Image: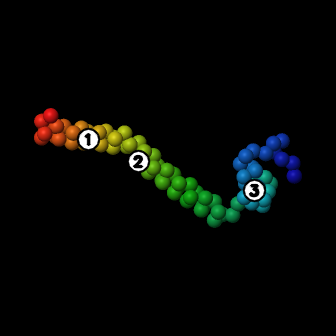
């Protein structure tokens, strides 16, 4: 078996360390079982859904921080108005 490239990448080494057979089967282009492809696509969809939800939550961080600062300013302003410093 002749390698496709003269070097091994970090992912090649990691895959080999995880499972020697997985590395071998990938290198020879072994056929993939029909059920395996369907499960792989389902896993990709699940990851995309979860990562999309996480990205939406992270994109709203500035908005939440703005509301927090606005509430803090209102609280300080109210305390100053009540105690009239």
Q: Residue furthest right?
A: 1
Is disc 3 in contact with disc 1, using a CB cutoff of under 8 Å? no
Residue located beneath label 1 in the image: 72
Which percent across, then down, holds residue 12?
75, 49
Q: Earlier in the sequence, mark 1 or mark 2?
A: 2
What's the colour scheme? rainbow
Q: Is residue 53 visible?
A: yes
| x, y percent for residue 80 | 16, 37
Mark 3 or mark 1: name the one nearer the start of the chain: 3
- The residue carrying mark 3 is 17
The residue where tag 2 is placed is 57
Residue 46: which numbered mark, if any? none
Which image quarter: residue 84? top left
Pinpoint residue 31: horizontal percent, then vertical percent.
74, 59
Pick the front one: 28 or 59:
59
Point 73% across, 54% down: residue: 15
In front of the other: label 3 or label 1? 1
**Which image quarter holds the C terminus?**
top left
Q: Residue at x 13, y 39 (%)?
A: 83
Position of residue 4 relative to residue 43, above or below, is above
Q: Nearer the viewer, mark 1 or mark 2?
A: 1
Answer yes or no: do the residues labelled 1 and 2 have beta carbons within 8 Å? no
Q: Which residue is depicted at the point 78% across and 52% down?
A: 27
For this view, does 66 lie left or right of residue 16?
Answer: left
Q: Which x, y percent locates residue 18?
A: 72, 58
Q: How many marks?
A: 3
- Residue 22 seen in the figure: no
Q: Which is nearer the N-term, disc 3 or disc 2? A: 3
Q: Residues within 10 Å of mark 2 (few under 14, many from 20)?
A: few
Q: CA distance from mark 3 to mark 2?
A: 36 Å
Name the foreground residue: 29 vs 17: 17
């Amino acid at each position: 078996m002749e390698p496709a490239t003269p070097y091994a990448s970090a992912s090649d080494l990691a895959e080999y360390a995880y499972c020697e057979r997985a590395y071998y089967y990938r290198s020879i282009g072994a056929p993939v079982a029909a059920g395996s492809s369907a499960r792989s696509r389902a896993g990709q969809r699940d990851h995309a859904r979860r990562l999309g939800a996480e990205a939406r939550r992270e994109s709203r961080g500035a908005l939440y921080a703005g509301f927090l600062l606005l509430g803090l300013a209102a609280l300080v302003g109210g305390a100053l108005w009540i105690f009239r410093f």
